[in-house]
Amino acid sequence: MKAKESFGSRLLMHWFGVKRPFDEYKHQQIGRIGTNAYMILAVYLLVSSIVAIFVGQKHPEEALMGLVMINIVMVGFVVNIYILIATTRAHIVTREIQVTSRQEIIKKAVLKGIGFGIYFMVIMLMADILMDWYFDGTSPLNSVENMGVIWPNVRSGLFFGATMAIYEILTTKVYKE
């Protein structure tokens, strides 16, 4: 009888992109990678907060905007890229398949990439519409009709979907029987 995985295990598998089976080695590696990511963020938060305090004494608006932007870059890119590289090096995101199922895996990866691309495009389009409405006072209906708002999001969705499909294919290892 198969034991049911806990919600925490499923969340870790989803967040780190781990394929089944979720064994003890993968669990330990995720713990190590998560601890390292936490240490990077803890040091960063300490240093950035001290810098923001000193800069904020004379220029509070610039300090706030700088802190928000650098937080987005740090969490969105630096830590996530570290996690991506570390999980790839530890081979916990690699999926082993047989030679016969290679075409099927490629087809699934392409479909998954298309889905991710559409999802990303819609989310970014909604974010653009909300930001235009909030900051510029532009009507959401005008933003939806504006091709200057739509096309950059379509391009970013295509790029994101293609990147996810390629990543899915590259993390698949073919083994011979």
Image: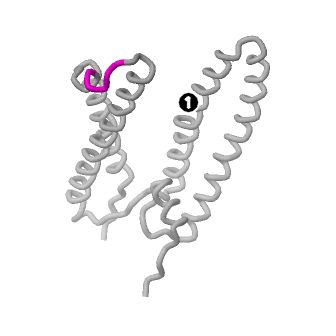
Image position of 40 (left or right of 117): right
Residue lying at 57% horizontally and 37% vertically, measured from the top left: 75
Which range is magenta? 138-142
Residue lying at 78% horizontally and 16% vertically, measured from the top left: 57
Q: Determine whether 87 is above or below 1 in the image.
A: above
- Could you tell me which secondary element the residue under label 1 belongs to? helix
Residue 129, located in which quarter of the rendered image? Answer: top left
* Magenta segment includes 31: no
Residue 20, located in which quarter of the rendered image? Answer: bottom left
Which quadrant is the N terminus positioned in?
A: bottom left
Q: How is the image coloured?
A: one colour
Image position of 39 (left or right of 21): right
Which quadrant is the C terminus positioned in?
A: bottom left
Residue 55: image location, x then y, percent: 74, 17
Residue 104, located in which quarter of the rendered image? Answer: bottom left
Residue 67: image location, x then y, percent: 64, 25
Mark 1 is on which residue type?
A: Val
Residue 103: image location, x then y, percent: 20, 57
The residue nearer to you, when weighing 148 against 136, is 136
* Magenta segment includes 141: yes
The chief SS type of the magenta part is: helix
The residue nearer to you, when weighing 68 against 97, is 68
Image position of 84 (left or right of 166): right
The residue nearer to you, when weighing 94 against 45, is 45
Q: Which residue is mark 1?
A: 73
Residue 111: image location, x then y, percent: 23, 50
The residue nearer to you, when weighing 151 against 27, is 151
Residue lying at 35% horizontally and 56% vertically, measured from the top left: 172
Q: Determine whether 141 is above or below 19 in the image.
A: above
